[in-house]
């Protein structure tokens, strides 16, 4: 077997251009399949990262307009829920007691946006009223100071947590900003807060192109009760809960949804909802995997074309070496020896093309993953599978020419010119 492989490699070296052109179909097929799978994995990872930004284990709760009997909404009618239609703090507390699986409950209230100014220095700030769990649910990373506390919420204190970008723009450093009073000029009023903490601003993957630091708008977090001071509504239209680790997410979502539907079953205008992104992520991943495999299968057609090329060149090789085959058989070579020699040559041809295709496919996959902006991921089983498949092509398409060579009559072969 080793001798046959050495002879096969020698044959490839003797006809470099012909061998390369024969391998080209294999190279294109293998590299296409690997590149498509690698880019598909990168795109899936990118989607997973974007879903993770929103919290894959978070359950979003809220209210929405109730659909009519046909299941549609009257888009011409714009309604605002009354305070009695919204979810109250008492209902949230009851929910916590009814569902001990709840680990965190995050609240957020839009309190306007404006410019924080000190002389000619300014920073765009979007004010959000939050509770302490908001930072844990939304992965807010503190740089200095502290976050909004339960005491801040209970007392509706005028304190704020600003981003490191705002602190540097107004005060030059994070340390200088702690304890300072900040004035935020909105369309309706000038709001004043004491800075108690600085968090690290991170660019969201969903935001697209970054804006300049001068025009960047970052969030300023204040106690939700402080944000409610200027609002005519004391209750909430939405909140986010996170179950404890080990809780079956879909089952928990269904149970809490049934509970909310009971609360709103007599409300003619509004209904409650509860959903998580896990099922959406699973559906998206399944769709992307199916799409990648379909495209890879289409790219794999090039492998069939490459296999036909291998068969063609092996038939030519049998014709060219008919006299050699006759000599070998006259010296005692059996049919199996001749068959093995040509099959080994076809496998060497395909395997060499497969290795080159893998290298090229990995390179293309890395470029594609870089364009997508996700880490390069490729299973070792995919690489091994493509190598074995390329060798299978060599055996499958090389067997017919090899068998034809093995069945030649030695006398006719020796007479062949």
Image (cartoon, grey):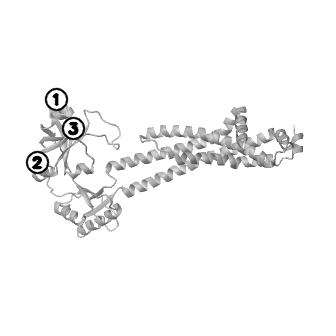
Element on which disc 1 rests: loop
Q: Name the residue under label 1.
A: 120
Residues at marks 2 and 1, CA–CA distance in whole angstroms: 28 Å
Along the polypeptide, which appears first: circle 3 or circle 2?
3
Residues at marks 1 and 3, CA–CA distance in whole angstroms: 13 Å
Residue 157 numbered mark, or none: 2
Mark 3: give few (<14), some (14-19) or many (20+) Cα within 10 Å: many
Mark 1: give few (<14), some (14-19) or many (20+) Cα within 10 Å: few
In this view, the mark in front (3 or 2)? 2
Q: Name the residue under label 3.
A: 124
Does the rendering let one see residue 76?
A: no
Q: Residue at x 25, y 32 (%)?
A: 214
**Is 75 placed above or below 167 here?**
below
Q: Which of 176 and 13 is in front in this view?
A: 13
In this rendering, position of residue 392 left or right of residue 281: right
* The C terminus, quarter of image: top right
Residues at marks 3 and 2, CA–CA distance in whole angstroms: 22 Å
Q: Are marks 1 and 3 in contact (CB under 8 Å)?
A: no
């Amino acid at each position: 077997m080793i001798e046959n492989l050495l002879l096969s490699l020698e044959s490839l070296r003797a006809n470099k251009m012909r061998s390369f052109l024969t391998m080209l179909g294999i190279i294109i097929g293998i590299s296409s399949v690997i590149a498509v799978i690698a880019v598909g994995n990168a795109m899936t990872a990118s989607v997973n990262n974007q879903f993770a930004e929103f919290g894959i284990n978070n359950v979003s709760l809220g209210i929405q307009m109730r659909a009519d009997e046909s299941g549609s909404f009257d888009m011409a009618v714009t309604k605002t829920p009354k305070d009695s239609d919204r979810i109250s703090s008492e209902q949230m507390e009851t929910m916590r007691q009814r569902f001990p699986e709840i680990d965190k409950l995050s609240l957020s209230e839009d309190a306007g946006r404006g410019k924080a100014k000190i002389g000619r220095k300014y920073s765009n700030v979007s004010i959000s009223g939050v509770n302490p769990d908001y930072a844990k649910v939304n992965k807010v990373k503190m740089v200095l100071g502290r976050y909004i506390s339960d005491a801040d919420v209970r007392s509706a204190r005028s304190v704020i947590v600003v981003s490191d970008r705002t602190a540097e723009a107004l005060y030059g450093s994070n340390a200088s900003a702690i304890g300072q009073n900040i004035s935020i000029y909105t369309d309706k009023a000038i709001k004043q807060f004491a800075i108690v903490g600085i968090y690290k601003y991170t660019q969201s993957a969903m935001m697209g192109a970054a804006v300049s630091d001068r025009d960047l708008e970052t969030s300023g977090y204040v106690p939700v009760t402080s944000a409610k001071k200027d609002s005519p509504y004391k209750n909430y239209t939405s909140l986010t809960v996170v179950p404890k680790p080990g809780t079956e997410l879909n089952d928990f979502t269904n149970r809490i949804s049934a509970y909310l539907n009971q609360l709103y079953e007599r409300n003619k205008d509004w209904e409650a909802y509860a959903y998580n992104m896990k099922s959406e992520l699973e559906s998206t991943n399944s769709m992307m995997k199916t799409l990648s495999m379909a495209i890879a299968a289409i790219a794999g057609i090039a492998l069939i074309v490459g296999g036909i090329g291998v068969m063609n060149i092996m038939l030519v090789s049998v014709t060219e070496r008919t006299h050699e085959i006759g000599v070998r058989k006259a010296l005692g070579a059996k049919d199996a020896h001749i068959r093995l020699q040509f099959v080994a040559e076809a496998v060497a041809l395909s395997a060499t093309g497969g290795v080159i295709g893998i290298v090229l496919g990995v390179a293309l996959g890395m470029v594609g993953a870089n364009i997508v902006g996700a880490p390069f991921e490729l299973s070792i089983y995919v690489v091994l599978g493509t190598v074995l498949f390329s060798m299978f092509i060599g055996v499958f398409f090389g067997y017919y020419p090899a068998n034809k060579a093995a069945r030649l009559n030695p006398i006719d072969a020796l007479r062949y010119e």
